[in-house]
Image (cartoon, coloured by chain):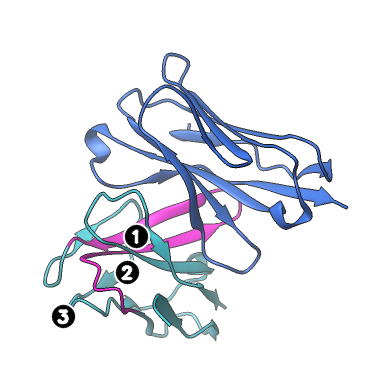
């Protein structure tokens, strides 16, 4: 079983809809959680990070962490075609130390 | 332009051949990383370097070696390529080890036949 599970998608939504992405993890030692966005044939780029349970907002993006359920989410409001990309969750902590453990990524398509 | 460059962009390689993937950053970051990305498996860490002169093994180090002679360069070598090493390889860097913001290069698409 992978330490971090993420539905590969693709997730197709109409422009303006809310995109909901999530990851589950098995390692309760993970303390730091990140979302990276990766456009086709590009390297990933950090979108958001959070260190605690609860919500964190940044513009149209909201990251949510529920450590008790080992579940993290990313919501994209008012989605745009430019949001079409693969979204990867990443996390670190515990024995993994400074190394990031990534989910497999969810491909998102926002149709105009 | 500040950032990470990788070369080559793509390569087709015969099995058994030696190959070095190049990675250079101009941000004076201390830490550098090599990942491979395979469909459905996300990014897996191959090797890392917390600072010039030091390297460490990641999750999938077998068949790969790295060196970190200076701050800017972090080449990845496949001593004798095998088809299972067909993948997209990303180099990344961060200001310090463990910094959550890792800056990624554009990747190298490697096919081993």
**For mark 2, what is the residue?**
B64
Q: Chain of mark 3?
A: B
What letter labels the chain drawn in blue? A
Quarter of the rendering occupied by the C terminus of chain B: bottom right
Q: Mark 1: which secondary structure?
A: strand
Residue farthest along the top direction in this orientation: A68
Q: Are marks 2 and 1 in contact (CB under 8 Å)?
A: yes
Query: What chain does mark 1 sit on?
Result: B
* Residue at the (60%, 54%) spot, across then down: B39
- For mark 1, what is the residue? B46
- The residue at the point 72 percent across, 57 percent down is A82
For mark 2, name the chain: B
**Lateral position of residue A80 relative to residue A35, left or right:** right
Q: Quadrant of the N terminus of chain B?
A: bottom left
* Magenta span includes B29: yes
Q: Which mark is residue B69?
A: 3
Residue B22 in the image: above or below residue A13: below
Q: Nearer the viewer, residue B71 or B36?
A: B71
């Amino acid at each position: 079983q992978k330490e971090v599970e993420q539905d590969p998608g693709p997730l197709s939504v109409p422009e303006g809809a809310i995109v909901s992405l999530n990851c589950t993890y098995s390692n309760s030692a993970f303390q730091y959680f990140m979302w990276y966005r990766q456009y086709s044939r590009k390297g990933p780029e950090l979108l958001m990070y959070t260190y605690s349970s609860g919500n964190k907002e940044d513009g149209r993006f909201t990251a949510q962490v529920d450590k008790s359920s080992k579940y993290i989410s990313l919501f994209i409001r008012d989605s745009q075609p430019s949001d079409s990309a693969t979204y990867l969750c990443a996390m670190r902590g515990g024995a993994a130390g400074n190394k990031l453990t990534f989910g497999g990524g969810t491909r998102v398509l926002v149709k105009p | 332009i500040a950032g990470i460059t990788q070369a080559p962009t793509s390569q087709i390689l015969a099995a058994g051949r030696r190959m070095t993937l190049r990675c250079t950053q101009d941000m004076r970051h201390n830490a550098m990383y090599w990942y491979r990305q395979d469909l459905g498996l996300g990014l897996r860490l191959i090797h890392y370097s917390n600072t010039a002169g030091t390297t460490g093994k990641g999750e999938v180090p077998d068949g790969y070696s790295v060196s970190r002679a200076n701050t800017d360069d972090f080449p990845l070598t496949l001593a004798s390529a095998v088809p299972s090493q067909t993948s997209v390889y990303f180099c990344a860097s961060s200001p310090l080890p463990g910094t959550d913001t890792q800056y990624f290069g554009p990747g190298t698409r490697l096919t081993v036949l």
